[in-house]
């Protein structure tokens, strides 16, 4: 199987988006995650999935200025580049 460049957009359910992103790495794909709403709630579930992102090497980004203190901020051009470089996009 050829490695794919996959993009997960966290639009509604942050925990599920983090879980999906981490799970997609099992097949050897390169996975990116972009939080498009925020902030991410500080819950035990989200903390667990954030740790899973670290273990899988996924470095999330965001389009939400309020989250830019903790994550790299993508402007419209940056988001367009990330979208254009993805082989597939999953919106959660």
Image (cartoon, rainbow, N blue to C red):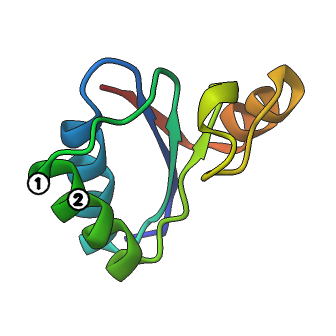
Specify few, some or many for label 1: CA neighbours under 10 Å numbering under 14, 14-19, or 20 or more: few
Left or right of residue 61, residue 15 in this image: left
Q: Position of residue 65 (x, y in %)?
A: 70, 27
Q: Residue at x 71, y 40 (%)?
A: 82
Depth check: 20 or 54 in front? Answer: 54
Q: Residue at x 29, y 39 (%)?
A: 17
Q: Which residue is mark 2?
A: 47
Depth check: 31 or 63 in front? Answer: 63
| Quadrant for the C terminus in the image | top left
Please state the total of marks drawn on the protein image: 2
Q: CA distance from mark 1 to mark 2?
A: 5 Å
Left or right of residue 72, residue 81 in this image: right
Q: Residue furthest bottom?
A: 55
Specify few, some or many for label 2: CA neighbours under 10 Å numbering under 14, 14-19, or 20 or more: some
Q: Which mark is residue 59?
A: none
Depth check: 27 or 11 in front? Answer: 11
Q: Residue at x 68, y 47 (%)?
A: 69
Residue 52 image-quadrant placement: bottom left
50 lies above or below 64: below
Left or right of residue 69, residue 90 in this image: left
Say whether marks 1 and 2 touch (CB < 8 Å): yes
Q: Position of residue 58 (x, y in %)?
A: 47, 66
Q: Position of residue 59 (x, y in %)?
A: 55, 63
Assign a secondary structure to mark 1.
helix
Depth check: 28 or 58 in front? Answer: 58
Q: Which residue is mark 1?
A: 44
1 lies above or below 4: below
Assign a secondary structure to mark 2.
helix
Q: Position of residue 1 (x, y in %)?
A: 37, 71
Q: Residue furthest left?
A: 45
Q: Residue at x 63, y 28 (%)?
A: 66
Residue 62 image-quadrant placement: top right
């Amino acid at each position: 199987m050829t490695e794919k460049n996959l993009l997960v957009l966290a639009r509604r359910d942050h925990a599920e988006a983090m879980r999906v992103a981490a799970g997609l790495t099992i097949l050897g794909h390169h996975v990116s995650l972009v939080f498009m709403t925020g902030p991410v709630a500080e819950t035990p579930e989200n903390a667990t999935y954030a740790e899973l992102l670290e273990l899988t090497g996924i470095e999330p980004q965001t389009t939400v200025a309020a989250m830019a203190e903790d994550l790299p901020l993508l402007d419209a051009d940056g988001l367009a580049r990330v979208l254009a470089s993805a082989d597939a996009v999953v919106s959660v």
